[in-house]
Amino acid sequence: MNPNESQLTQALKSFVFGHGQDPNNCLVIFFAGHGHTEKMAYGADLGYIVPKDAPLPLRDKAGFMQRAINMQTIEGYARSIQAKHALFLFDSCFSGAIFDMVRAVPAAIDYKTANSVRQFITAGGADETVPDRSIFRGQLVEALNGEADLNRDGYITGTELGEFLQEKVVNYSRNSQHPQYGKIRDPNLDKGDFVFVLDRAKPAEEKIQLPPKPPETAGLDLTSIKKAEEERAKIEVQWQAWQGKMRSDFNELEKMERSTGLGSEQKKSLWQKFLNEYNVDNPFSSDDEQMRQRAAQRIKELLKVEVTIGARVSLRSFAQSLSKGEVGAMLKRHNFFSGRYYNNNKDFCNPDGDFSNSYESRVINGDKVVLDHATGLMWHQSGSENPMPYDKAKQWISDLNRRGYAGYQDWRLPTLEEGASLLERTKMNGDLYIDPKFSVNQIWIWTSDTDSGSSGRVWVVYFGRGVVHRTGPDYDVRYVRPVRSGQ
């Protein structure tokens, strides 16, 4: 437009006290039209914005001064703007010293935007006429469409805009119009640069990385597993009922033994029926096995015959060197049990043997012993706490005699005959084939008999398998269970 004086003044105030109050905004002011800046002979280097209604100064100096706006006023407005960056564009010629023509270009966009600046660009220099069909205005549009981005970084600075307009307007006006550009003469307002952001400078929208879609699946067929678990639960309930019945029968048999006048044969028959009825292992419990062991023990106790001292079985008490054949004959002669231990003892086992002991537990002088009335032997109830080799077993016996265990000093290692007499036909003491009156700690025990078929080997009793066997004297996993003759 071609503004008059009042329109021009109002526009300036609106920018300064309106848009220019926001420190985060940039301000661009355009002065366009047929007017031009005027340099007077008085007021050193003082330029004016001349609106259309201002008279010529040579004809009406007072009227000119009343309507024209001097560049000091423009400079005052520029300094009053609160925005960090302000760019003034004049589509008119210009003369004056409001801005510095020295145009150092900052190095980076962030530096340019971080510092304040007041920049000016005019369509022409002093004493030049700006045509109605403004070359400046057309090139400004081209510049802001991206032509002025001289370094192709996506930003147009005020300095780039000034350089572009100066080059293009001078060229297209055939050197008759020379745009001017620069920054205000103020060290606090000349460090930055006005920046236009082109569309291509805007960062591309970040592509959101979506997770992959799940593969198609028919799912796991757990029907058979669920059905098996349901069946397992039903079976466990059935076993619980079976064992409940077993426990009830066991308790009833114990009660009958204590409160009725049944003879030993009747009692043995009832316990055997119990074992026959409940001879299957419950996979969900170990209580049934304990009841079977107790029933077998009761049968064993009922099978024991009352013997007198004269009727006792006399077992060899002195050490000998025995062959495998002699051991096998001894087992059968006394009906001692010794099970099959794979093929290791096929020549000296007696799986059908079943010797009847008659045990009695006693405490003598504070020491525990077990008397066997069937053999007349007194046994150390617990034996050695730790295993040891053969020579140390003998020393252990000597130390025991020096202390006088249970008041006696004639304790010794048992012969194989005496040790084999302790073997039970079934497990009766946890996992051991020995009566519960003895300690469960001694799995193997040394005897005083040696193996005549090999040099140095010693006969031992293995309660963990229910067998007699032989081993080297240096084995340190055998225990000591001392015995003495006579009661």
Image (cartoon, rainbow, N blue to C red):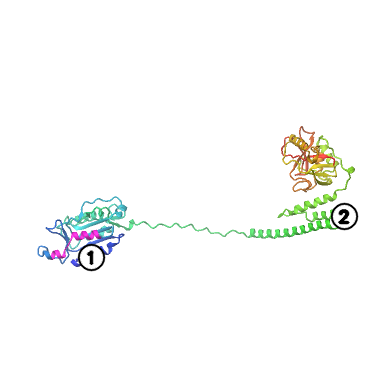
What's the residue at 24%, 50% (across, down)?
Answer: 104
Prevailing secondary structure class for the magenta stretch in the rendered image:
helix
> Picture coordinates of residue 203 (x, y %)?
36, 56
Earlier residue among tags 1 and 2: 1
Instruction: Using a 10 Å C-alpha cutoff, classify the residue at mark 2 as few (fewer than 14 neighbours), some (14 to 19) or many (20 or more).
Output: few
| Residue placed most toward the observer, 106 or 439 | 439
Residue 328 lies within the magenta run = no
Q: Which residue is mark 2?
A: 263
> Picture coordinates of residue 126 (x, y %)?
15, 57
> Picture coordinates of residue 243 (x, y %)?
75, 57
> In this rendering, does residue 274 appear at all?
yes
Quadrant of the image containing the N terminus: bottom left
Quick one: which residue is furthest to the right in this view? 310
Quadrant of the image containing the C terminus: top right
Q: Which residue is mark 1?
A: 11
> Picture coordinates of residue 432 (x, y %)?
76, 46
Q: Amino acid at mark 1?
A: Ala
| Residue placed most toward the observer, 439 or 68 | 439
Q: Amino acid at mark 2?
A: Gly
Q: Which residues are magenta?
A: 63-80
Residue 232 placement: quadrant: bottom right
Quick one: which residue is furthest to the front in this view? 365
Q: Secondary structure at mark 2?
A: loop
- Nearer to us of marks 1 and 2 is 2
Distance, label 1 to label 2, CA atoms, is 132 Å
